[in-house]
Image: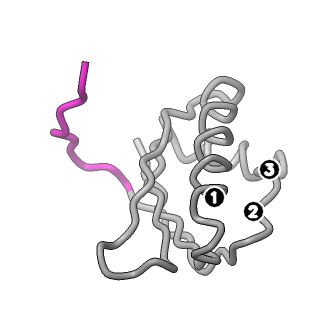
Amino acid sequence: MVRVIYRWRIDPARRDEFVAWWHEATVRIRSSHRGAMGSTLLQPKNDDVLMVAVARWASEGDLEAFWADGAGPGFSGSELEAIELFEELDHLTLEQT
């Protein structure tokens, strides 16, 4: 498993649009790209400009195939400022049912 951390700077006036864009893109990616296991969107409590997403992929190869496929369009009210790739060593998060 691998995790990818994406960091965007957004226009705070377009926060709700960004959240909807991210949600729709994540659902689409999860259903159409092999190995896509979803993502979590976060925003710091004291920063209305930063958005962070943590995506989970079955393998680095699946992620690279997604990136090679163009990785989808960005959000016009944002600037993607960083992408970090991590190997998942352990996963103990409880999921809601």
- Checking the image for residue 87, the label placed there is none
Compared across the picture, whether 77 is left or right of 13 comes to right
Residue at left 53%, top 65%?
Answer: 6
Q: Amino acid at mark 3?
A: Gly
Q: Earlier in the sequence, mark 3 or mark 1?
A: 1
- In the image, which residues are magenta? 87-97
Q: State the residue lying farthest toward the top.
A: 97
Compared across the picture, whether 54 is left or right of 44 comes to right
Q: Earlier in the sequence, mark 2 or mark 1?
A: 1
Residue receiving disc 1? 18
Residue at left 57%, top 75%?
Answer: 12
Q: Are marks 3 and 1 in contact (CB under 8 Å)?
A: no
Residue receiving disc 3? 72
Q: Nearer the viewer, residue 91 or 22?
A: 22
Kindly indicate the quadrant of the structure image that contains residue 9. bottom right
- Asked which secondary structure carries label 3, the reply is loop
Tell me where residue 10 appears, x and y as whole percent.
61, 75
* Quadrant housing the C terminus: top left
Residue 39 within the magenta-colored segment of the rendering: no
> How far apart, in angstroms, are the residues tagged by discs 2 and 1?
7 Å
Tell me where residue 54 appears, x and y as whole percent.
43, 55
> How far apart, in angstroms, are the residues tagged by discs 3 and 1?
14 Å
Q: Are marks 2 and 1 in contact (CB under 8 Å)?
A: yes
Q: Amino acid at mark 1?
A: Phe
